[in-house]
Structure formats: structure tokens, C-alpha cells
Amino acid sequence: MAGEHRLLLRNAQQLVLVCTEGEKYLLQAGMHSLALLRKASLVIGTDGCVKAVGHADAIHQQFSDASFEKIIDCSGKCVLPGLVDAHTHPVWAGDRVHEFAMKLAGDSYMDIHQAGGGIHFTVEHTQRASEEELFSTFKHRLLRMLRAGTTLVECKSGYGLNLETELKMLKVIERARRLLDINISSTYCGAHSVPKGKTATEATDDIIINHLPKLKELDLNKEIHVNNIDVFCEKGVFDLNCTRRILQAGKNMGLQINFHGDELHPMKSAELGAELGAQAISHLEEISDEGISAMARAKCAAVLLPTTAYMLRLKQPQARKMLKEGVIVALGSDFNPNAYCYSMPMVMHLACVNMKMSMKEALVAATINAAYALGRSNTHGSIEIGKEGDIIIINSSRWEHLIYQFGGHQELIEYVIVKGKVIYKNERVMGY
Ligand SMILES: N=CN[C@@H](CCC(=O)O)C(=O)O
Ligand SMILES: [Zn+2]
């Protein structure tokens, strides 16, 4: 095939496609037969999408007359799809390292929250921060995520709670979406906590009467585009009824439902999400058996967050049971001031060790299934012809090293590529 193309990745030792039939997600059986090629090459076109993928000799022959803006020799290396992080809170001011010390000394997440710390602490600092300051720290965090292999990330608001600060956060997310290479799915999370001085019902009314119509107006004016709506459905935060009202109002204006549920207490959030047609529910440490069946039937993704259970010493989400029952399992880092982890390789490792997932299951959960949780698996999450050319190259002859080398991704990930363009080239890669 003659013509000009953007990128040729030549002769990878392993090229992990994840899937090959345009699947929107993979269930347990599909996860086990992870699609992978050996001695393979990949071509990305000038539109940034995958043009061809196959055995190195076949691609060499097929593209013998073609020219490429860039060629990378991948001999001895592995090529994988860019990782997808399905749950983060990356826009905020005021870290909570002092609370980490309190938690290590025995305070629970809710003790700290109810004493006015936790989310409230971050809200106070975020309300005071300028848009510039928030953008600058957010950009830095996104670059760290990118260097850890994430090419599509969900980003929530939720440390504003009042309309003015929620909009400030969403503007910052919109600006990053327009300026930076990393792909972003943006989430309005104005119901992340009940603002001081309001009841949960008053906060719910404020969101439905004031926040959501403003978001709709800004969307129509093409100023801010939001993809998902989120609520922290939890005892002492938003109950099932308030959660239902907010999520339904968001759905009515075209947002995908993607919310926090059944984290610290069993709330029947999973059952509610399945009933409302949620795209995804996160956490689910306290999900009921009925909730698991309902999510499986509704094709509602479970976004499991291994860092939360690890940091807060909670019981682990029942990943094995969910997989067995046919739930679509995805992963997220939950990056936030409580769980300061931006690395999906680390998250996959924790999912394997603490949630007993296999490495194949963890990789699928951090690629195609995480993309499904964001409604983006038609364009992201696997290496297939026509999908966006978002790729990572690791300096290892077996892809599993990305999970096995706990905390080693900084030396292992050699290239991060978005739409066929090298966004990051790691000069520290030395081999193993
Ligand atoms: N649980 C609610 N929200 C976050 C924590 C946010 C925070 O503590 O700042 C989570 O997903 O873990
Ligand atoms: Zn969260």
C-alpha cells in the first residue's frame, strides 16, 4: 500500500490487541483469551487512527511502497493499547498528607469527613484557588498520568460544591481537553459531598434547579462539554432518593450516569444504577448479591478502585464474584487527595494481588472495559483498525512486566503515543 502514513511500529516481540471483533467490552471468558500477536507491526495513518496491524512480514510487504513520518523499531519490546483510567479526581488545591498520618494512626475516612476534613478540607482550598493555579497543578498531574501510560482519563469536578467553583473546575478540565494530547472524559460531580450549611435535600434541589441548567446552557454555547454525571451515594452524604433525583435529572439532559456507590455502606446503589441505566458505578466494596446480578443484566460497568481499599484498609471489592456473574469489570486509579496514585500499572498490580484478578483480566479492565465505562470503547481501549492510535511501548519482551514490576513503570514505559504522535519518549529506559 503506497502513500504517506504517520507511524510504523516495526517488529514488536508482542503486540497486545486486547480484542479483534469490535467488542464493546469483554466478560470473563473473553478476558482470558486476550488477543495478542508475536513478531508484529502496526501502522497508524495521518488521521491518527490504526490503519493496519499484523505479522511483521505481512505488514512489511503490504506497505513496501509507503512512507512514514516516523518509524520505531520495536524488536524485543511490547506494544499495548494506551491505558484507560476510568475514575479520577484530579483538579484540586490543598493536599491531605496530614490526614494520611491520621489514618495511619487509626482514624477512619468517615471520622475525618464528619469532623470537617477530607473532602471538606479540599473544597475549602479549591474554592480559594485561582483557575490558573488549578490548571497548572492539573496539567502536571495529567502529564504524570500520561507518563504512566494513561491515554484516556475520566476527570471529575466535585471539590467546589457551589456552582461557581464547580464551573471553575469544569472550565479547567475543558481547557485541558482542548490543549493537551491526553483524552479526557469529563464528569460533573457537584454531589460529591453535602456543602456545609445545607441539608442533602437542599443541596439536591440546588443541583437540579441551578447547576444542571447552567451546564446545559454552557454546553449549548460550546463553552463546556460534560460527559458524565456523578453522585457520592453514601450514608451521611447523598441517600438513595437524592441520588436518584440527581442522576435522573442528569440523564434527562443527556449525561451518562457514572457514580460512586456501595463504598463504605451497603446502599443498594448498584440496584439503583442498573434501574436508571447507568453506564458505570464505582467502588462497590459493599455491593449486595442482588446488586451484582442487576449490574450484570444491565451491562453496567463496575469500576473497581484498588487504591481505595488499600489506603483505607477497607474490605476488597468482590472482583471474582462479579466476573463469575457476568459483570463488566473495569479499573480506575481514583487519583484524589485521599489516594495519591496516578499510575494504572500500579492499580493493575493491586487488582491482581488484592482483588485476585489475573494479569489478563487486569489489563482488559484497564483498557477496553474502562473505555466502555466511559462510553468510549468504539474508539479506544484496544488496537483495532479504525480506532484511535493510542499506544504504549514497553521495554520488555513480555507485556506482563507492566504489571509484575510493581512501581517499575517509570523505567519500563518507553513511549506513549496518542493518535500516532509520540507524546512521551522516556530517556531513562535501560533494559532489565
Ligand atoms: N468516595 C468519594 N470520593 C473519592 C474520595 C475523594 C476524597 O476523599 O477527596 C473516592 O472515590 O475515593
Ligand atoms: Zn471517587
Image (cartoon, rainbow, N blue to C red):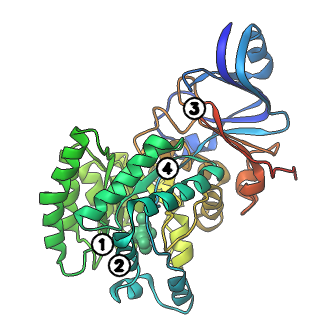
Q: Circle 1 is placed at which residue position? A: 193
Q: Position of residue 337 (x, y in %)?
A: 49, 72
Chain-order first, disc 4 or disc 1: 4
Q: In which quarter of the image is residue 417?
A: top right
Q: Above or below — where is 314 with respect to 210?
A: below
- Residue 33 left/right relative to 378: right
Q: Is 278 positioned to the left or the right of 82 in the image?
A: left
Vertically, is 195 above or below 77?
Answer: below
Which of labels 3 and 1 is toward the front? 3
Which residue bears the numbered disc 3?
419
How far apart are the two marked residues, 3 and 2, measured between alpha carbons? Answer: 38 Å
Distance from disc 4 to disc 1, alpha carbons, whole Å, reads 22 Å
Kind of residue at badge 1: Ser
Whichever of labels 3 and 1 marks the residue nearer the N terminus, that label is 1
Q: Report the residue marked by disc 4.
A: 153
Disc 1 element: loop
Q: Residue at x 50, y 58 (%)?
A: 136
Please say if the residues under marks 2 and 1 sit with CB atoms less than 8 Å apart: yes
Query: What whole-number distance in Å separates the C-alpha atoms at marks 2 and 1?
Result: 8 Å
Relative to the observer, which residue lies in front, 207 or 311?
207
Mark yes or no: residue 285 visible: no
Secondary structure of residue under mark 4: strand
- Pointer 3 or 4: first along the chain: 4
Amino acid bearing label 3? Lys
| Labelled pair 4, 1 in contact (Cβ < 8 Å) | no
Query: 247 and 67: which one is in front?
Result: 67
| Label 1 crowd bin: few (<14), some (14–19), many (20+), radius 10 Å | many
Whether disc 4's CB lies below 8 Å from ligand 2 is answered no
Kindly check if marks 3 and 2 are in contact, taking CB atoms under 8 A apart as contact: no
**Residue in the image at 76% along x and 36% along y:** 14
What residue does disc 2 label? 120
Q: What residue type is labelled 2?
A: His
